[in-house]
Structure formats: structure tokens, C-alpha cells
Image (tube, rainbow, N blue to C red):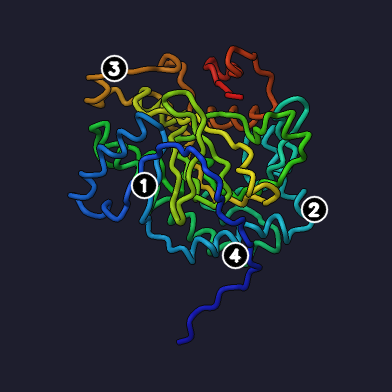
């Protein structure tokens, strides 16, 4: 029986790796080759717990996807931007401001950055499970591969992380997995994002910031590492540092919803996108990411039964009676990001109040 054929796709040529001398962030490396045995998982629990409590960030290696499979997905990720005409793209506009959804395209210049400068990030999102969503004609032959990639993110990367985080709180292993069902109503999505170079004038007006420092609204974000060094994280010392490119690795960070569910035990990571090093100026930056949210009906209240939280205490963003559902929180964050009025505080921090909770942006 002949092997199934896969449709051909144009190759996206990424930027060469930077040769600049850079002070990189200390991101913990988590080896997922150990996650498949009880002994290996037991070894990883304190590593993941400490990484997400101290940094809110970590880097996963040996996650089960080959380098060749990753490159194939990067080639597919470029299709919505390079092979779909602009008039067709408008038919799949996500209209995030109006409905709080990420499904489809976020056009360039959608978010305000600073001093009248708007973003140069083009994004396309496929919401889990993906088959119920209409897609541009050029992308349709690749939907089965995209769905397989979403399943890999969900079951081979996200779920093991959620199990380790639950064990870090001394909760039953499936506690968080049960609140992240693949077929449930929600907004977990696969994202393709293409960052385009900006003018010197735009860089000066924004002080080289491409996306303001922020926390993600969901539980866990998976960013597949790529060679253009632009992601920066704020460390415990409040300094910004680039995240080093490690081939075929996944940068993992906790978001607001995870911080709320864990009673402040796990930290929503503060991160931003910044102008790349000089030898990568002029290149586009194409990225793959999988943003996970709890099921829409999950209320973002701490797990008070956690023996860990009973020992260390709970930090709440609001009283439990006022805690939003995942749907309410991700909708309001999506519709207001880059389009809301913020109050500027000291040290470049801007604040806005959403659903009674303070959300900070770091410039």
C-alpha cells in the first residue's frame, strides 16, 4: 500500500542565528524525555514547580516533535501571510475588539504600541479543535497537519506540564488536565505570527519595543523557539533579558489564569517582544505558538484544598465570589489589549482595571 502523500509547501527561509554577544535570561531547561516514567516525573515535579514559581518561564526539550516536523510546520505557518490575497484575508478577520475572539486574522497595525506607532505583527489563529472553523483556500490542504500539531501540543506538551504543576501543588495528578479538555468549549488556539521589520523612526518612537511587556491571559502558553531573538522576559531582579534560541525547544510560560488558579503560587510571566540584535535587523520573524486556556466554564478561584497553599497561603487578585470564569477573563483581555486607555505609573508601568482586577503593561 503506497504511503500517503502530503501536499507540497513553499519553504520559508528563517533568519540566520545571531552572532551578537547577548546577556540571556536564565531560563530553566526541562527534559521531557523523563516525563514518561514515574521516576522521571518525580524528578521533574520540583524542577517545574520551582521554575514556574520563580520565573513563570521554562524551556522544554525532547518533547517528541522532530526538527524536520517543526520546519514543516513553520513552512505551513507562512501560508496565511504569503499565499492568501488581502481581499480574502479580510473575510477571516477575527474582530477581536468586538467579540473577544482570536479566531482567524489579526491584521497588522491593530494594536497601539506608543507615540502613535502601531504594531507590525500579522497573526492567524486556529481555535481548538479547528475543524469547525473556516480557513482560506490556500490553507485548507494543510488542516489535517495543523490539527495533528494541535493534538501534539495538547496531549504531549500541555497535559504533561499540567500534571507536573498539579503535583507541585500536591493535588491529584489530573486536576488541571480535567479543566483543559481538548473538545471543550473554549479559546485554546494554535497561532501563526509574522513580525515585520519597522522603520528607524518607529523604533525610536517606541524605544525599540515591538509588543509591550505583559502577562498572558490564559493558563499556559507554548512558544516554539525560532532563531530571531526578540522575546524578552523580566527576571526576578526586574531586568529585561532576551531568551536564547535553542533549536527544537518550546518556551513555556504561565499566564494570569494559572496564577489565579494556583492562588499566586505559580507566577504569570512578564514578557515582551523587543527589536532583535543588529545582525538580525531586516528579517521577518515567523513564530508558532499554542495558547492554552481552561475550559470556558471554569471559575478562576484558587485550589484551596491544595496542601501547599494551606501551608504557604493564598494570594488572590479578587475575592472568590467575584472571580471571573475563563470565558469572561479571556474575552475582556482579548478585546481590550492594545486598544484600551491605561494609566501611566512609575518606571514605565501602565495600569488598567478589568473586571475589578488591575492589569499591568510594562513599557
Q: Which of marks 2 and 4 is nearer the N terminus?
A: 2
**Residue at the image point whose x is 63% and y is 34% from the top:** 211
- Report the quarter where the N terminus lies: bottom left
**Residue at the image point whose x is 58% and y is 19% from the top:** 354
Question: Which numbered marker is on residue 86?
Answer: 2
Which residue lies under the disc numbered 1?
Answer: 159
Compared with 222, 306 (above or below) is: above
Real-space Cα separation, disc 2 to disc 4, in angstroms: 20 Å
| Left or right: 316 in relation to 207 | left
Q: Quadrant of residue 42?
A: top left
Q: Earlier in the sequence, mark 1 or mark 2?
A: 2
Secondary structure beneath disc 2? Answer: helix
Q: Position of residue 166 (x, y in %)?
A: 29, 36
Secondary structure beneath disc 4? Answer: helix
Q: Residues within 10 Å of mark 3 (few under 14, many from 20)?
A: few
Q: Quadrant of residue 108?
A: top right
Q: Are marks 4 and 1 in contact (CB under 8 Å)?
A: no
Compared with 346, 303 (above or below) is: below
Real-space Cα separation, disc 4 to disc 1, in angstroms: 24 Å
Q: Are marks 1 and 2 in contact (CB under 8 Å)?
A: no
Q: Earlier in the sequence, mark 4 or mark 1?
A: 4
Q: Are marks 3 and 4 in contact (CB under 8 Å)?
A: no
**Residue at the image point whose x is 68% and y is 29% from the top:** 207
Question: Which numbered marker is on residue 142?
Answer: 4
Real-space Cα separation, disc 1 to disc 2, in angstroms: 37 Å
Question: Which numbered marker is on residue 313?
Answer: 3
Q: Quadrant of residue 303?
A: top left
Secondary structure beneath disc 1? Answer: helix
Q: Position of residue 9 (x, y in %)?
A: 63, 69
- Report the quarter where the C terminus lies: top right
Q: Which of marks 3 and 1 is nearer the N terminus?
A: 1
Amino acid at each position: 500500500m503506497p504511503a500517503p502523500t502530503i501536499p507540497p509547501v513553499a519553504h520559508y527561509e528563517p533568519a540566520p542565528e545571531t552572532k551578537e554577544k547577548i546577556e540571556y535570561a536564565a531560563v530553566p531547561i526541562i527534559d521531557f524525555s523523563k516525563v514518561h516514567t514515574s521516576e522521571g516525573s518525580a524528578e521533574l515535579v520540583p524542577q517545574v514547580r520551582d521554575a514556574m514559581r520563580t520565573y513563570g518561564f521554562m524551556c522544554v526539550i525532547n518533547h517528541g516533535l522532530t526538527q524536520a516536523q517543526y520546519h514543516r510546520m513553520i513552512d505551513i505557518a507562512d501560508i496565511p501571510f504569503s499565499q492568501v490575497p488581502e481581499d480574502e484575508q479580510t473575510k477571516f478577520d477575527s474582530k477581536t475588539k468586538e467579540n473577544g475572539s482570536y479566531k482567524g486574522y489579526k491584521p497588522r497595525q491593530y494594536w497601539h504600541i506608543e507615540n502613535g506607532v502601531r504594531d507590525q505583527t500579522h497573526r492567524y489563529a486556529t481555535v481548538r479543535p479547528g475543524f469547525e472553523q473556516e480557513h482560506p483556500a490556500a490553507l485548507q490542504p494543510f488542516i489535517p497537519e495543523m490539527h495533528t500539531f494541535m493534538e501534539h501540543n495538547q496531549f504531549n506538551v500541555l497535559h504533561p506540564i499540567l500534571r507536573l504543576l498539579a503535583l507541585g501543588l500536591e493535588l491529584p495528578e489530573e486536576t488541571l488536565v480535567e479543566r483543559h479538555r481538548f473538545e471543550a468549549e473554549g479559546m485554546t488556539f494554535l497561532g501563526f505570527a509574522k513580525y515585520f521589520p519597522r522603520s528607524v523612526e518607529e523604533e525610536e518612537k517606541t524605544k525599540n519595543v515591538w509588543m509591550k511587556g505583559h502577562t498572558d491571559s490564559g493558563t499556559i502558553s507554548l512558544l516554539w523557539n525560532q532563531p530571531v531573538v526578540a522575546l524578552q522576559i523580566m527576571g526576578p531582579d526586574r531586568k529585561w533579558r532576551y531568551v536564547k534560541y535553542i533549536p527544537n525547544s518550546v518556551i513555556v510560560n504561565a499566564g494570569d489564569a494559572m496564577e489565579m488558579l494556583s492562588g499566586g503560587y505559580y507566577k504569570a510571566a512578564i514578557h515582551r517582544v523587543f527589536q532583535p540584535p543588529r545582525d538580525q535587523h531586516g528579517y521577518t520573524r515567523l513564530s508558532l505558538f499554542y495558547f492554552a486556556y481552561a475550559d470556558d466554564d471554569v471559575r478562576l478561584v484558587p485550589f484551596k484544598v491544595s496542601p501547599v497553599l494551606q501551608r504557604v497561603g493564598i494570594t488572590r487578585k479578587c475575592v472568590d465570589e467575584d472571580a471571573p470564569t475563563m470565558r469572561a477573563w479571556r474575552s475582556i483581555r482579548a478585546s481590550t489589549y492594545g486598544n484600551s486607555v491605561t494609566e501611566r505609573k512609575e518606571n514605565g508601568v501602565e495600569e488598567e482595571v478589568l473586571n475589578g482586577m488591575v492589569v499591568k503593561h510594562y513599557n
